[in-house]
Image (tube, rainbow, N blue to C red):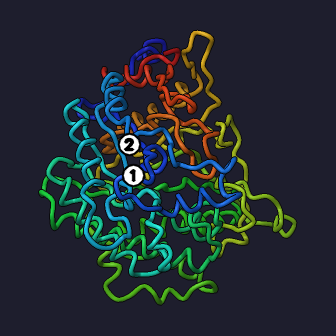
Amino acid sequence: MPESVASVTPLTFPPAFLWGAATSAYQIEGAVREDGRTPSIWDTFSHTPGKTAGGETGDIAVDHYHRYREDVSLMAELGLTAYRFSISWSRVQPTGRGPAVQRGLDFYRRLVDELLAHGIKPAITLYHWDLPQELEDAGGWPERDVAHRYAEYARMVGEALGDRVEQWITLNEPWCSAFLGYGSGVHAPGRTDPAASLRAAHHLNLAHGLGALALRSVMPTRNTVAASLNSSVVRPVSQDPADLAAARKIDDLANGVFHGPMLHGAYPQTLLEATSSITDWSYVRDGDLETINQPLDALGLNYYTPTLVSAAAAADASGPRADGHGASTHSPWPGAEDVMFRQTPGDRTEMGWTIDPSGLHELIMRYTRQAPGLPLYVTENGAAYDDKPAPDGQVHDPERIAYLHGHLSAVHRALRDGADVRGYYLWSLMDNFEWAYGYGKRFGAVYVDYPTLARTPKSSAHWYGRAARTGQLPPMEG
């Protein structure tokens, strides 16, 4: 086909491809003290002075708890076919133990019913970082008991919603929970203990396995169980053996620590060796790896930017580390003191993250090879920009349209190369509380005016809606 023709031929996706958006409970719901909800670690962390930008919290967030009907209607108007949201654990089981609070579950029943009434497929994430504070007080994820508490919670939610929700995700980005929460301390609960971060990683893995078993014991067999991993695309700065070894170490700590047990029933031996001076891994008990290695129905991939590393020269040891995970004097990478993170070249988002759609294609094809036959979903992908309303009240964000076009083109290329990608979830549906960054970073396709909470779809929302309705990528000019 002549290039002039190919360049104007729209990229068409399979008819059953899901066009979704994603959010998480603490970032959007608000209503943190209503209907029996108790504090999570993010309530505590955000109310601790100095932990979030401007001391901002998710107390109100964007008030989705009270405005969910408006938000679902907006999704339907845009043409979305799927919506991925998370359950607030402390809303449905306030102490992390004992019976469910029906008022909390009723909110999610209403939300799911509203989605289904509008023809939108719900996808539930059971854990998106908001551990009930009482479980953290008892030791948090470094303690084995939390994995068993999670399984009980998963069973409760599965029993309540499994009759009407088919897609289930056990954990979202367990790397962040373990290594940013317990290693660098830039996420809740804000602890800085490398050994605890590795214990947390194992118990998150165990929670995934136990949770998958619990869900399947109470749900219809048609339902699917997956996990969403923020697997990194780790690239060495050169082919020098020292740089290749650095990339392997970070790949183990970013990826192998989770996909090793989940997909293959084993931790990488190189990971165990690299962290042997920090932990002896004695908390991995007989039978744990078999429990973690439950058959998955799908795998969710969250992708934003690649990671570029080199071996650290002596002069680099105290230098800045451009690892993209917030400012901290503590590293989220236990055992990787000899690795230097480099800034990747190219245009950047407001997060300072390099825009590189090729990394998404690379990630999809890696798991296509590593787990043949396993369906994949892009469960998060998106960009933060400094969006502002124009004088006419509209919010124009051509940079985000270009970002989405580039990354969805990478997904299309992966489909053409034989990958089984079933859907794409834009992060995020709307501007919200961006964790330690507070409200200063806008990832939404829908603009939120925080003083009034008014919602205004940005030009990227309309562009993405056209893609969802037609199954084809519109031109970048929107």
* Number of other residues with Cα within 10 Å of mark 1, as a class: few under 14, some 14 to 19, many 20 or more: few
Which residue is label 2 attached to? Answer: 65
Tell me whether the residue at label 2 lies in contact with that at label 1, contact meaning CB atoms closer than 8 angstroms.
Answer: yes
CA separation, marks 2 and 1?
10 Å
Taking the image as drawn, is residue 294 in sight? yes
**What is the x, y in percent for residue 154?**
28, 64
Residue 169, compared with residue 378, is above or below; it is below
In the rendered picture of this protein, how many numbered marks are placed on residues? Answer: 2
Disc assigned to residue 34: 1
Could you tell me which residue is drawn at 42 percent across and 61 percent down? 38
Q: Amino acid at mark 2?
A: Tyr
Disc assigned to residue 72: none
**What is the x, y in percent for residue 218?**
15, 64
Decide if residue 186 is on the left or right side of residue 220: right
Q: Residue furthest right?
A: 315
**Nearer mark to the viewer, of 2 and 1:** 1
Could you tell me which residue is drawn at 47 percent across and 59 percent down? 129
**Lower position in the chain sequence, tag 2 or tag 1:** 1
* Number of other residues with Cα within 10 Å of mark 2, as a class: few under 14, some 14 to 19, many 20 or more: some
Decide if residue 453 is on the left or right side of residue 225: right
Q: Is 368 or 456 nearer to us in this picture?
A: 456
Q: Quadrant of the N terminus?
A: top left
